[in-house]
Image (spheres, rainbow, N blue to C red):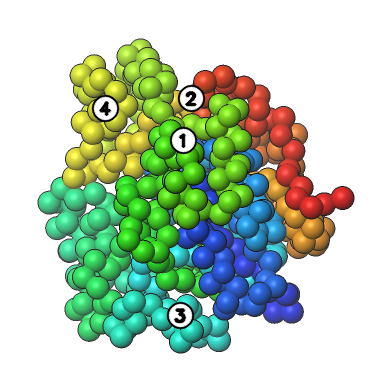
Amino acid sequence: MSTNTSRSQKVGVGIIAEYNPFHNGHALHIERTRLLLGADVPVIVVLSSCFSQRGEATLADKWTRTRMALSNGVSLVLELPFAFACNAAPEFARGAIDILAATGLVTHLSFGMEHPFKVKNSSQPTLFESESSPAPDRKAAAPDIDTIFAILMQEPPSFKLNLKKNLDSGQSYPKAVAGALRCELSAQGCALPVSNFPAPNDMLALAYVLHLRRKRHALIPLPVQREGSNYHDAEPGPSGPASATAIRRALTAEEAWTKESWLKEAMPASSLELLWSERKRGRLCSGTDTLWTLLRGLLNRSSGEDLRRCAGMDEGLENLFLKHCARAHSCEDFIGRCVCARYTRSRIRRQSIRLLVGLDRWTALMLSRCSPPYIRVLGYDERGRELLQASRKTASVPVVTRPGAASDPVARASTDIEFRASRLRELLLPIPDLQYDERQKPIRKGCD
């Protein structure tokens, strides 16, 4: 589904996000993107649906997070289906970028990085190179994306050797690739920004750019320097935006809703108000007790052969699940027992959710090879409505508001998995509404 954007097309920027929840770091990302592309550039977001890329149920549902985005400068919000959203970086990137490219409305792809790279043959500077907002380690030359791309695509012998060595030592695949890439760049004389390049968000950004190059999508990558706390920091940092992890943890405490809460300085007021409203309705998902009950029940009645039918259940992972199921006392205990050098915490979480949703390997393979069969609209403002009207001429796949009406077999499979995932998230709430997602219509902000 390669899409070539016309040179005469007006600039539109795509952002891939979870907004779990939308906080000041996300607002800063949009601000910095507009600093480079113009204050009036329309922002189109592809938003993870009901589970995050790390395999966690989102704190608020996709519709509330869409409202957060529309209240903070986004014009159009599109859904990243569960099969791609709750997946490893390459598939996550594949689904999101193919959706943005298929709209025919996007010229640039903006994403955050700990250590932004340089982009050759582009008249558009990255924020890392911008004099108006220099990166903290700007004196150290960032690796050129074409150099990184050549290594990952061609996999020279030295890269393969280091990758094998890292895997044999028990490292997870993402960590093994990062280490091998770092060794290769150093051997080629690249001046790495810091010793931990590439960091987790760098690796996800590389997955974006690799997919852009492989599919020859005409989207210009626009790396933006991340600021503030690291993604996994569980406490607010001394300066800069707090991480989403710290914000989610704080929101589960009663103190989060007092006048003195630091959250009022970490999030736009509109985001906090929406979360407060969802909390009163009992629709914030913050615990895993029900999830563990469901997972333990499924594993208790399953054989290894049953589990192997699930997408991603490879390399004997089913034996690990069955081994630790009977011994674990909670979801976090189970995940902790399964985590090892080979299997990351995120992979165990994702695999658990895939099992509960019932995403089999053949359906996952079909969706991966065919790419997203439709574009589902979650919300828009007045400008977003104009973009949707334009998409009738530019989009290469159907743009839909009610995916349940899809007739194409691939579209039906994607919709079925999406609604199953939404129902699973509903089961984690105090009062589940199993058809909640199926009844929703796109959110219209400021539209007559």
| Residue for point 62% across, 22% down | 433
Which residue is label 2 attached to? Answer: 428
Vertically, is 179 above or below 55?
A: below
Which residue is label 1 attached to? Answer: 57
Of all residues, the one furthest to the top in this rendering is 301
Pointers 1 and 2 in contact (C-beta within 8 Å): yes
- For label 3, the SS is loop
Which comes sooner in the sequence, label 4 or label 3? 3
Residue type, numbered disc 4: Phe
| Residue for point 32% across, 36% down | 348
Vertically, is 172 above or below 390?
A: above
Residue type, numbered disc 1: Ala
Residue type, numbered disc 2: Leu
Comparing 344 with 83, the one in front is 344
| Residue for point 43% across, 33% down | 254
Which comes sooner in the sequence, label 4 or label 1? 1
Which residue is label 4 attached to? Answer: 334
User: Which quadrant, please, contains the N terminus?
Assistant: bottom right
Of all residues, the one furthest to the right in this rendering is 448
User: Label 1, label 2: how many angstroms apart (C-alpha)?
Assistant: 9 Å
User: Label 2, label 4: how many angstroms apart (C-alpha)?
Assistant: 18 Å
Describe residue 264's horizontal placement relative to residue 341 as left or right: right
User: Label 4, label 1: how many angstroms apart (C-alpha)?
Assistant: 17 Å
Vertically, is 113 above or below 58?
A: below
Which residue is label 3 attached to? Answer: 133
User: Label 3, label 1: how many angstroms apart (C-alpha)?
Assistant: 35 Å
In the rendered image, which quarter is residue 62 located in? top right
Q: Residues within 10 Å of mark 4 (few under 14, many from 20)?
A: many
